[in-house]
Image: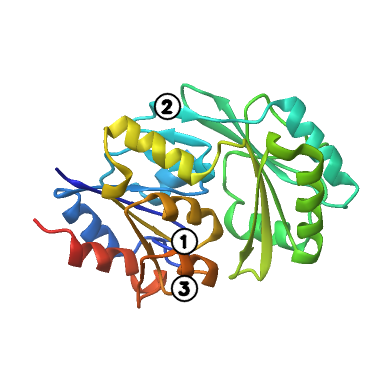
C-alpha cells in the first residue's frame, strides 16, 4: 500500500517567493508514482491550484486551515463554514479594537468559487500583503462595509501582536467554542495573523476526514509543517516533520527536524530519500 505524505505550503513546501522550484516539481511528480502526495494549507482552492498546477495530485487536499477538504477534481469531502450572523458578530466585536478583517467566503459549492472581501480601512501589513500578492487576484472585492457571508470560510486579521493577542482573548471570552481562533506569527512580514474559523476547521480534523475517505490509519501518514496551525496534525500523524525554518513551538512537536529550510527544498529532499520505488 502506498504511503501518504501531506505537506503545508507556505514556508514549508513553497519557497519564500511563493513558488515551487523545478527540483521540487520534479521530485514530487516522480515520487507520486510510489506514494500518495497532498497538501494541508491555509490557502484556498484557487490559490493552491495555481501554485500546484504542474504537480500530480490525487489524494484530497486540506484547505483553508482545514475548513475544506476537497479532491483535486473539486469534489467536496468536508466543509465547515461560519454563518453570516456569527461572522458579523465577530466583526462587530473587533471594530472597537480598530481593526477589520479580510473575509474569505465560498460563493458556490459546486464550482468552489470564492470571494475575498477587503475592508475599507487597512493597516500597513494588510495593505502590504494585498499590494504585493493579490493585486491581480480575481476574487478581490474592496468593500465599503466589511461583513460576513452565508458561507464564511475564515476571517483574517493582520497586525502587531500587541493588538491581536488582546483581540483574540476578547473574542475567545465572547464566543467561546462557537469559533476556532488561531494566532500565529508571520516571520517574513514581522507581524501576526489572527484567523477566525468554524470550531472544526483545523488541520487535525481535516486530516481525519482524509484518512476516513482513503480508509487509512493516521499512523501511516507523514506530515510536514512550519507553523502553529500544523501542530494539530503533527500530534495526529504517525510521523511529523518540521522544516529547518519552522517555529520553535512546532519543532518541539516534531519527530524529525530537517536540516534544510523551505528555500532549500526540504520536503522534496525528504521525499527523494524516503519514498522508494
Q: Residue at x 33, y 37 (%)?
A: 211
Query: In the image, is 79 to the left or to the right of 12?
Result: right
Per the model, the C-alpha gap separating discs 3 and 2 is: 32 Å
10 Å neighbourhood of mark 2: few (<14), some, or many (≥20)? some
Q: Which sits earlier in the primary sequence, circle 3 or circle 1?
A: 1
Per the model, the C-alpha gap separating discs 3 and 1 is: 15 Å
Q: Residue at x 63, y 68 (%)?
A: 189
| Mark 1 or 2: the one toward you | 2
Spot occupied by residue 9 in the image (x, y as percentages of width and height): 43, 56
Seen from the viewer's position, the closer of residues 162 and 268 is 162
Q: Which sits earlier in the primary sequence, circle 1 or circle 2?
A: 1
SS category of the residue bearing label 3: loop
Q: Is residue 98 above or below residue 250?
A: above
Residue 155 quadrant: top right
Q: How is the image coloured?
A: rainbow
According to the picture, the residue beneath numbered tag 1 turns out to be: 18
According to the picture, the residue beneath numbered tag 3 turns out to be: 245
Spot occupied by residue 136 in the image (x, y as percentages of width and height): 57, 48
The dot on residue 68 is none
Spot occupied by residue 119 in the image (x, y as percentages of width and height): 77, 44
Q: Quadrant of the C terminus?
A: bottom left
Seen from the viewer's position, the closer of residues 35 and 30 is 35
Query: In the image, is 193 to the left or to the right of 4?
Result: right
According to the picture, the residue beneath numbered tag 2 turns out to be: 76
Seen from the viewer's position, the closer of residues 157 and 220 is 220
Amino acid at each position: 500500500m502506498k504511503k501518504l505524505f501531506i505537506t503545508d505550503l507556505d514556508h514549508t513546501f513553497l519557497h519564500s517567493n511563493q513558488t515551487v522550484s523545478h527540483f521540487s516539481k520534479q521530485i514530487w511528480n516522480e515520487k507520486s508514482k510510489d506514494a500518495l502526495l497532498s497538501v494541508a494549507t491555509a490557502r484556498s482552492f484557487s490559490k493552491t491550484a495555481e501554485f500546484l498546477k504542474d504537480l500530480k495530485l490525487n489524494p484530497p487536499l486540506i484547505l483553508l486551515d482545514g475548513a475544506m477538504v476537497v479532491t483535486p477534481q473539486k469534489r467536496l469531502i468536508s466543509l465547515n463554514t461560519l454563518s453570516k450572523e456569527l461572522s458579523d458578530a465577530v466583526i462587530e466585536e473587533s471594530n472597537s479594537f480598530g481593526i477589520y478583517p479580510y473575509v474569505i467566503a465560498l460563493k458556490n459549492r459546486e464550482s468552489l468559487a470564492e470571494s475575498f472581501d477587503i475592508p475599507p480601512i487597512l493597516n500597513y501589513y494588510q495593505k502590504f500583503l494585498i499590494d504585493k500578492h493579490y493585486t491581480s487576484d480575481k476574487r478581490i472585492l474592496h468593500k465599503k462595509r466589511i461583513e460576513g457571508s452565508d458561507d464564511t470560510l475564515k476571517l483574517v486579521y493582520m497586525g502587531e501582536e500587541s493588538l491581536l493577542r488582546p483581540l483574540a482573548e476578547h473574542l475567545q471570552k465572547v464566543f467561546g467554542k462557537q469559533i476556532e481562533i488561531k494566532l500565529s506569527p508571520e516571520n517574513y512580514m514581522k507581524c501576526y495573523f489572527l484567523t477566525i474559523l468554524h470550531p472544526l476547521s483545523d488541520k487535525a480534523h481535516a486530516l481525519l476526514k482524509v484518512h476516513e475517505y482513503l480508509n487509512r490509519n493516521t499512523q501511516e501518514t507523514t506530515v510536514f509543517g512550519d507553523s502553529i496551525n500544523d501542530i494539530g496534525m503533527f500530534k495526529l500523524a504517525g510521523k511529523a516533520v518540521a522544516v529547518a525554518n519552522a517555529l520553535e513551538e512546532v519543532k518541539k512537536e516534531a519527530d524529525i527536524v530537517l536540516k534544510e529550510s523551505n528555500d532549500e527544498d526540504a520536503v522534496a529532499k525528504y521525499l527523494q530519500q524516503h519514498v522508494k520505488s
